[in-house]
Amino acid sequence: MHHASVASDSTRDHRRVRTARRVAGILFSLSLLAAACGDDDDEATTTTEAEASEGTSSTDDVLGPENKATGEPVKIGLISHGATEALDNDIELVVAEATVEWLNNHHGGMGGRPFELVTCVDGNDPAKAADCANRMIEEEVAGVVLGSHSQPESVYIPLDEAGVPVMFYATGVAKILDDSDNAFVLADANSTINLPLEVAKEADASKVGAVVIDVPAALQGWQGDNATAPPLFEAEDIELDVVPVPLGTADMTPQMQTVASGDPGVVHVLGNDSFCIAAFNGLEAVAYEGQITAISQCMSDATRTAVSGEVLDGIKVTASAPIGTENPSTELYEAVMATYADSEVDTTRTTGYSAFTTVAGFGMAVKDIDGEPTHENVIATIEGMELMDLPGAGGLQYRCDRTAVDGDPAVCVAGSLVTTLDDKGQPSEYQVVGNDMG
């Protein structure tokens, strides 16, 4: 199967529009779908304290020099779904505790004082999520972090009214992205659209087919009166053909025949791994020979087993974390979990990885706070942070000065990671795209 070359990101900035905010919700909702359907690789990578004891010097080098926090603890909150019938996010609780220990032992906590993690599990229930937010207010936490959470507005509203700073891994809620007071978001809203658009431009393709899982959170960015994608493609004179496919469709050959018959130069697949498996196999069945792009939630060991190497080879994937490769970010995450987690952690799961990035991102942003950790001071410290590497993000940098993404003042990160798969479905080196924040 023939695939086009890597896309340039040189014209990315001028295509940012305010309506792109909804697309962050696509990434976020699909990460939850991946968790619900199993975002574990079949051969899970776990880390334990026993493993950490092997090669201690190298682990210590990765963790950084000792810089222990002392004195009265500063409370920060984590609100998680925990384990439900549909998904299991308990990994967030283990990862967050371990990350706090790393911050306290190697980065001096917050202004030299140790973090104390306050957790609340809401079972993916909006009412319980609001209760958890109110508990955080009662506990007088200095700030709250949310990783993989599908009820962000339920948490945000009471915290916002109380002036509590909140850091989200990702969200598509417009009022949160609009917030220039209390909210901070660690994912760029444009990444899932920019990948197929840039690939199509470089390949001089006149049409892109988007195969999108038919759930509102995913589809709203691609189809409808207020959808983000159509005007962006229209501005580049590239036709966009959106094909929604219901979750659970095992054989997508008929839908892929429809896509392929339109002769798109690029086909973009957006769904969880089982959805993408059916799409990839359907494209092979109808002999599609153009470029395929996808989101990271498409890829798992199940995908690598069920899809032929000929199809996998050359697929371009956008991601917010460099899972699946050896690099400083994954080495750091694995070392932190091996050293400080109180139980085994599957370090291939995006749910755990996003919790690490969010907790560590908050911690690094406030570690040099001057004065008492009041809400106002925490917010001012985050807004005044210098540009720095986002922990676990493969070289992506962040700064929360309200200027990273035009029209979305809460967003702290521009750009994303892009990788090209080999014939075994494994990622090559991740490239940072669109992250020039000056």
Image (tube, grey):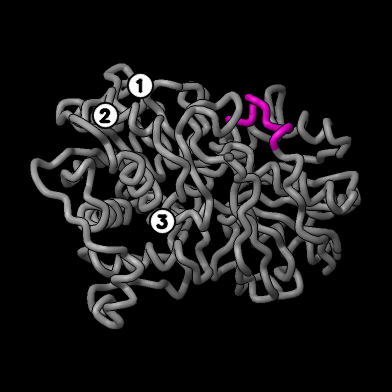
Could you tell me residue 55's position as x and y percent? Answer: 30, 82
Could you tell me residue 239's position as x and y percent? Answer: 86, 38
- Report the front residue among 197 and 343: 197
Residue 133's tag is 2
Q: Earlier in the sequence, mark 1 or mark 2?
A: 2
- Report the front residue among 371 and 265: 371
Query: Image height check: is 420 above or below 238?
Result: below
Q: Residue furthest top?
A: 161
Residue 39 part of the magenta-drawn span = no
Marks 3/1 in contact by CB < 8 Å: the verdict is no
Report the magenta residues as a range: 13-21
* SS class, disc 3: helix
Query: Image height check: is 81 above or below 410?
Result: below
Query: Image height check: is 315 above or below 132?
Result: below
Give the crowd class for mark 3: few <14, some 14-19, many >=20 residues within 10 Å. many
Residue 92's tag is none
Marks 1/2 in contact by CB < 8 Å: the verdict is yes
The residue drawn where x is 35% and y is 21% is 157
Q: Earlier in the sequence, mark 3 or mark 1?
A: 1
> Is there any visible trace of residue 116 in the rendered image?
no
Residue occupied by mark 1: 157
Residue occupied by mark 3: 353
Q: Earlier in the sequence, mark 3 or mark 2?
A: 2
Quadrant for the N terminus in the image: bottom right
**Which amino acid is tagged 2?**
Ala
Separation of residues labelled 3 and 2 (CA atoms): 23 Å
Q: Residue furthest left?
A: 71
**374 left or right of 356 in image:** left
Could you tell me residue 118's position as x and y percent? Answer: 19, 41
